[in-house]
Amino acid sequence: MSLFSTSYGNESALYAAIFFAILPVHAEVISWIAASKILGCTLFSLVALISFGKNLEKSSVFRNLSTVGSLVAAFGFKEQAIMVPPILVLLAAMYQKKGLSMALAKHGYLLILSVMGLYWSYLGSLGLAHVFPKKLASGIIHTFCMPLHCLYLYVQHAFIPYNLSIRYSSPSFQECMFSLVLTLMLVIFFKRSWRIIAVNQGVVFGLGFFLISIFCFLNIMPLPRPSVAADRYLYFSSVGLTFVTVPIFQFLLKRRWGYALLIIYISIMMVNTFERCLTWSFV
């Protein structure tokens, strides 16, 4: 059973659930302008996801243009849209269909990634971005604890919007130890549940991609400032989280009571989104 082989009504719920699961609400020091940027990025990213899903079923020039145009528009609102194209690539891989849609997603990802690199280079030329701040480069152990801390944040707030601002970007020693304990608990849990998890290759791939991406992007990629560690680059790890949530949503969509849970879940996400966009103040 493919990811998009549901009825039209089920498809809409599945698209919305997947999108809100993989795109935690980004709440920084928000003014009304920043709030509109976040909502605009969310809207166009969701349009891109729907267009790409429809394009997998039946490819057309309009759907291809709609996908690319929506991604460009989303990136224009907020640079976090860079995490959408790799999600589309992996969804296409999960759908087991190659061709124009797959190539389009790859090229779109490379294009936006290039623009993102130029963007940070431009900031660096203005003296606004600093690669590997002293706060992160001061200790190797502290830096390598960041993946554990971010994993802790994602597990704790996987389904609830959370502010990953500068205040939460640099973990304390106690938080790192708690993250380590939580990670060991997760390893034990998945070891006991491995037979069940191994049946779904998407879940296995998602978990691996989730953990590897956290490690690589926090310890290899240059970080413009400390907040990036708990913000922008952490969005890439949500690609793996997609594959963990998709089977859950597919299971719920097969049952009537599942619709009620999805409606409640999406409603909570939307309320928290607007609340954080409208009420966040300087800290």
Image (spheres, rainbow, N blue to C red):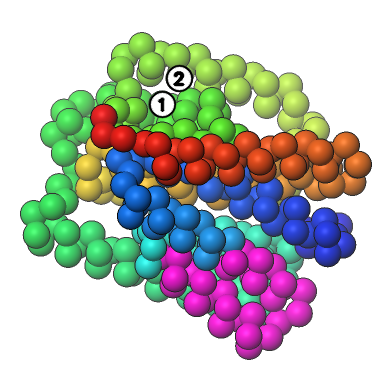
Is residue 54 in sight in this rendering?
yes
Mark 1 and mark 2: span between their CA atoms?
5 Å
- Could you tell me the amino acid type at mark 1? His
User: What residue sits right under mark 2 in the picture?
Assistant: 179
Residue ID at (17%, 31%):
135
Quarter of the image for residue 145 reads top left
Q: Position of residue 108 (x, y in %)?
A: 47, 73
Residue ID at (46%, 61%):
40
Q: Which mark is residue 80?
A: none
Q: Are marks 1 and 2 in contact (CB under 8 Å)?
A: yes
Residue ID at (80%, 33%):
196
- Span colored in magenta: 47-75
Q: Which mark is residue 149?
A: 1
Q: Secondary structure at mark 2?
A: helix
**Horizontal side of residue 177 vs 250, given as left or right:** left
Up the image or down, 2 lies above or below 198; here it is below
* Relative depth, front residue between 116 and 98: 116
**Horizontal side of residue 27 vs 245, given as left or right:** left
Quarter of the picture containing the N terminus is bottom right
Q: Position of residue 222 (x, y in %)?
A: 25, 48
Q: Position of residue 136 (x, y in %)?
A: 21, 33
* Relative depth, front residue between 245 and 269: 269
**Horizontal side of residue 202 vs 30, given as left or right:** right
